[in-house]
Structures are given as C-alpha cells and as structure tokens.
Amino acid sequence: MPKTSELVFAPELDQPIRYIDRTRSYYLGLGYETPYVWAHYLEVPFSPLKKLLNQSTLGLITTAVPFKVENGLQGPGAPYNAAAKFYKPYQQLIDGDIDLRIAHVGIDRKNADMKDSNCWFPLAAAKQAVEKERVKALSPHFYGLPTNRSQRHTLEIDAPLILQMLHADQVDVAVLIPNCPICHQSQSLLARYLEAAGIPTVVMGTAKDIVEYCGVPRFLFSDFPLGNAAAKPNDLRSQTLNFELALRLLESASIGRTTVQSPLIWSTDPAWKLDYSNLEKLTEQEIARLRVEAEKVRITARELRMKSVGT
C-alpha cells in the first residue's frame, strides 16, 4: 500500500479563544482574588418561528451606546472609557441620526476596528434584508441592553424592559449583537428571556465559550476579535453574508443550542488570538499599571451606576 502523506493540520492556536479562562487569569493576575462566576444553564428555552421571515418584523438589540461628546474619548483607538457606560435599557429610532460607539466595553483594542460601525451594529445589512424581502420590516426602534455584571439585574430589570419595548413595537424576531465578554453573557441571558416569552432570537457573537456556556437557542459565531460580532471592517460581503447566515439560522434551527460558525476568516495568521487580556504578553511594569487603571475604571463605573440605577 502507498505511504500516507504527512498530515498537515491547522495551527493549534487557531481555535476559538477561551474568554472565560482568559479573563479569569487576567483579573486574578491584577489582584482580584474572587473569580467571576459566569452564567451557566443546562436547559435552553426555544421558540420556533411563528411566521415566515418575510412576514415578520425584526428588532436589533445592541450593547453599543449612542455617542455623547461630553463622555470623553469614544472614537477609533479610544481607551476603555467607563464614563461612557450606560445602565438603563434604551431605544432609539431606526431611521434617526445613529452614532453608536463601543469604547465603554472591553473589546480587543489591538485587533478590532473602531471605525466601521457595521462591525458591531448590522443596520445596513438588516435594511438590505428588508429591501430584498427576506424580512418584512425592521422595528421602528433599535434597542440598547446594558453590559451588566449582575446576572440578576439583567434578568429581573433589564430584560423585562427590553421585552416591553419589543412588544410595543410588535417585534416578531430579534437579532442580538454583543461586544465584550460581559456583553456576550448579558445578550445570552436576554435571548433566553425573550425566547421564554415567545420571541425567537439569534445571537451574533465572537465569544463562543461564554454564549454556549450560558446556553442560547441560536448562535452565529464569527471567529473575529471582540468588537466585530457582525462583520469584518469595510467589508460589504462579510456584512451581507453574516446577516444572511443569522436569518437562515432563525429559519432552520429546530432545537436550542444550535450554533453555526461563519466561514469567514479574520486572518490567515491566528496570532491575534494571543493579544486579548493575556498576562503572558505583559511585563511586570505593565501589569502594575493595568492594576491601577482597572481600579480607577471600577470606581468610575460604580459611581456612574449609583447615579443611574442606585445600586
């Protein structure tokens, strides 16, 4: 028999980043001794489509925040900006003047694009789906879900408010787009809540372990840096393809925990996966500086939260 040629595999590094492990190690290394407990469920609520998509109204739910100049730097290359965080769900007209930013959350600032909002808010792709009659209509508003470390607050306060907004706009299906690790958990919890209330959902995200650990009905995974859950920057094909995949997942999933991975590749070199919150790539001086900055951010966020929701 002929000899088998040498097998050529992809690099071991070229697999989804384990954000739960990565962030746990990072914050332990910064001196926070109590590891964060991520939401985890065994059962997943699932609501099938009640109408065809071309007869349905679709709502977009984001964790991005409307830009306010008084909140400081939030544009391309901006550092983490806790002053721009929001703690109450919001809604905004879909056809208004929309400027959403993601500097308030822990995205991958080294690799993610902070210029093209189509990367984190697929409004153009959603409007295109309506024009092509894949979807009947978009809801008159889109909706903002706070990035909340408190799972209880997300489920008991934020999720009911979002559901109320969706009902008022007669939303039939919802697409949820998270950004940072905690965003992925918050959106996953919301997806579960909406499904239990009868609204089919699909999460478009990049933190596979967090979403699947929580457990959602439908998940479109893109192996991209955090902050690019919807598309690659300045890449119309990726916008269209990924949103179409999300719609197909809404149509085709028959049970909960259905994950589809986008075929798009961020880079032929997977080394970018080593950059996010990786203490092994930092010096002791850098870790000390980040420890101070993390504490300042925590205090700023806590004060803003107290002013906003009082807890």
Image: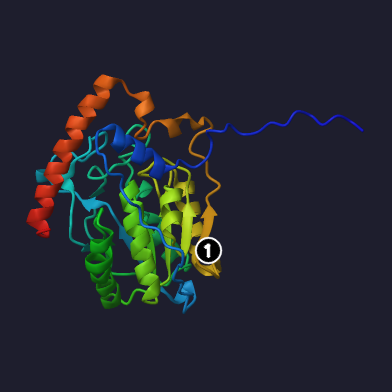
Residue in the image at 37% along x and 24% along y = 281
Residue in the image at 24% along x and 20% along y = 285
Colouring convention used in this rendered image of the protein? rainbow
Which residue is most to the bottom? 50
Which residue is most to the front? 33
User: How many numbered discs sit on the rendered protein?
Assistant: 1
Does residue 8 sit above or below 183 in this rendering? above
Pick the quarter of the image with the C terminus.
Answer: bottom left
Q: As rendered, which of 257 and 25 lies closer to the eye?
A: 25
The location of residue 165, given as percent across then percent down, is 25, 72
Name the quadrant containing residue 295: top left
Q: In this image, 131 relative to 2: left or right?
A: left
Residue in the image at 38% along x and 67% along y = 192
Q: Secondary structure at mark 1?
A: helix
Q: As rendered, which of 75 and 37 lies closer to the eye?
A: 37
Does residue 258 sit above or below 73 in this rendering? below
Residue at label 1?
248
Does residue 309 sit above or below 251 in this rendering? above
Q: Can the viewer see residue 233 in this picture?
A: no
Q: As rendered, which of 284 and 132 lies closer to the eye?
A: 284
The location of residue 259, given as percent across then percent down, is 52, 57
Which residue is most to the left? 307
Q: Can the viewer see residue 306 in this picture?
A: yes
Residue type, label 1: Arg
Which residue is most to the right? 1
Residue in the image at 37% along x and 59% along y = 188
The location of residue 197, given as percent across then percent down, is 36, 76
Q: Mark 1: give few (<14), some (14-19) or many (20+) Cα within 10 Å.
A: some
Pick the quarter of the image with the N terminus.
Answer: top right
